[in-house]
Image: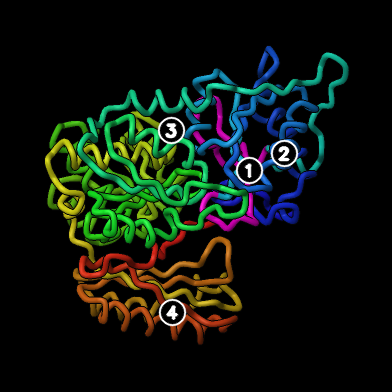
Amino acid sequence: MARLFGTDGVRGVANRELSGELAVRLGRAAVTALTERARDRPQIVVGRDTRASGEFLEAALAAGICSAGGDAVLLGVCTTPAVAFLTGDLGARAGAVISASHNPAEYNGIKFFGANGYKIPDDVEDQIEGIVAKDRAPKPTGRGVGRIMHVNDARERYLHHLESTPGGSLAGMRIVVDCGHGAASGVAPELLRRRGAEVITVNDAPDGWNINQGGATAPDGMALAVVESGADAGVAHDGDADRAIFADHLGRIVDGDEVLAACALDLHADGALERDLVVTTVMANLGLRLAMDAAGITVLETRVGDRYVLEEMLRSGAVLGGEQSGHIIFLRHATTGDGLLTALQFLGLARRTGQTVAEAASSMTRFPQVLVNVEVADREALDVSDSVWQAVRSAEAALADKGRVLVRASGTEPVVRVMVEAQSEDEAARHAESIAEVVAKSLGVQGGSTRERSERAVRTPWLASDPLEAER
C-alpha cells in the first residue's frame, strides 16, 4: 500500500483517500502504537476543524479508538495547537486532529500528537501504518471496549493557557481578525478582546464548506478591511489556526519571515533568545538571513514543513523558529505552531515597544522573490538533471551574494518549484523563468507553469497571499 503519512499526517479528499473505514483503522492503530505501555485505559484527545466531513471522520476515528480499548475524549471544533496543548493538559496518552489545515473544504486529514504535545516522529507513523496495513490492532470485547467522553471546557482551558503567556496588553489597538471560517472563529476574536483590543471580525461564520475562504492563505480581504476600517493591524488564520499572516495599517502584508525576524530581535535584545539561534526553512527570504547575521544571530535551515523546524529546534536547543507561511513556534509556550499565540506575541511586541506593526516588520528588508511552478512529467529526474543544475549555477554566479536560487521538487504534486530572490523583481523573474525553461525541457512539461511573486509593497494595500504554500 502507498505511504499514508505525508509531511503533516494523513491527508486527502474526504471519503475518497481519507474514508471513514480508514479513519476507523487509524484510530485502532493509534491506540496500539501510541499507548502500548499504558497500564490503565488509554485516552486519546480528538479535535477537528470546521469542515463538514470532520463530523463523520470524528465518529469513525472515535469508533476505532474505542474498538481497540481506548477512550476517545472529544473536544469538538478546536484548533490544532489547542489539541496539542490539551493533550498534555488533560493527561491523555495521545491527541488527534482532524483537519486539512489550509487545503480546500473537500479535503481532510488526521494527524497525531504524543502525550507530550509534540507531533509523533516518523518511526511511530511507520508503526501505525504497519498496523493499519495488517489490521492487527487488538479487538477487546465486553468491559474491554473504550468509551466516548466530551470535554465541555476545552475552549476556556485553551484561552486561559494563551492568556497566561507573556506579551502585554493590546489596549488601544484596533485589530481586524480574519478567521478563514475555520477553527479560529470561536476563539481568536475573544482572545484579542481579553487582551484589550478592539476587534473587527471577518470570515468568522463557518458552514462546513467555506473554510479557508479568506484567512492566512488569502489575506487580501483582511488587508483591505484594515485600510477601510482604519485599523492598526490585521491578522489572518488558516483553517486549523496554526498560522498567522498580518497586515499593517496601510494594508501591507506581513508574512512569517518578518514576524520571525521581529520576534528574534526582540528576544535577543532581552537576552532571552537561547543560544542566539533561529530555525527556519530553505524558503525563508534572504532578507531574514541578512538581518539575523547583522545582529549576531545564527540561522539554522531545514526542509519545508513546520515539523522539520520543530525537530531542529529540539535538536539545537533553539526556542524560536518558523516558516514564511506563518507557522511560528514559540517553544517556551507551545509544542507546535500556534497562530493565536503568534498574534499575541507579535502584536504585543508592537504595542509594548510603541511601534506600529509596519515599524516592527521593518526589522528585515525583504528581497523580491519570484516563484515559478513548473508542471513536469518526471519530478524524480530533477536530482540527476545536469542541465538544470548548470542553469542554477549560472544564475547563482550572476547574483553572487545579492540573491539566491532554490529549485526543488514538490512533495505532493508533479511540480518543480523554481524560486529566485534578487535585488529587483525584474532580475529575479528573469533568472527564475530562464531556469524554469530548462526544467521544462529537461523533465518534460506535464501542463504549464505559473509565476508568482512575493514582493511586498506599501503602495499596494492588498496583494496575493504567500505563494510558498506548505506541502500537504
Q: Amino acid at mark 3?
A: Thr
- Residues tagged 2 and 4 counted as in contact (Cβ below 8 A): no
Residue occupying the point 54% across, 77% down: 375
Q: Which mark is residue 335?
A: 3
Q: Amino acid at mark 2?
A: Leu
* Rendered image quadrant of residue 230: bottom left
What is the distance, in whole Å, between disc 3 and disc 1 at their CAs?
A: 18 Å
What is the distance, in whole Å, between disc 2 and disc 1 at their CAs?
A: 9 Å
Whether residue 436 sits left or right of residue 208 in the image: it is left
What is the distance, in whole Å, between disc 3 and disc 4 at their CAs?
A: 39 Å
Q: Which mark is residue 149?
A: none
Whichever of labels 2 and 1 marks the residue nearer the N terminus, that label is: 2
Residue matched to label 1: 110
SS for dot 2: helix
SS for dot 4: helix
Using the image as rendered, state which of residue 288 and residue 24 is in the foreground.
Answer: 24
Q: Is residue 301 shown above or below 33?
A: below
Q: Nearer the viewer, mark 3 or mark 4?
A: 3
Observer able to see residue 178: yes
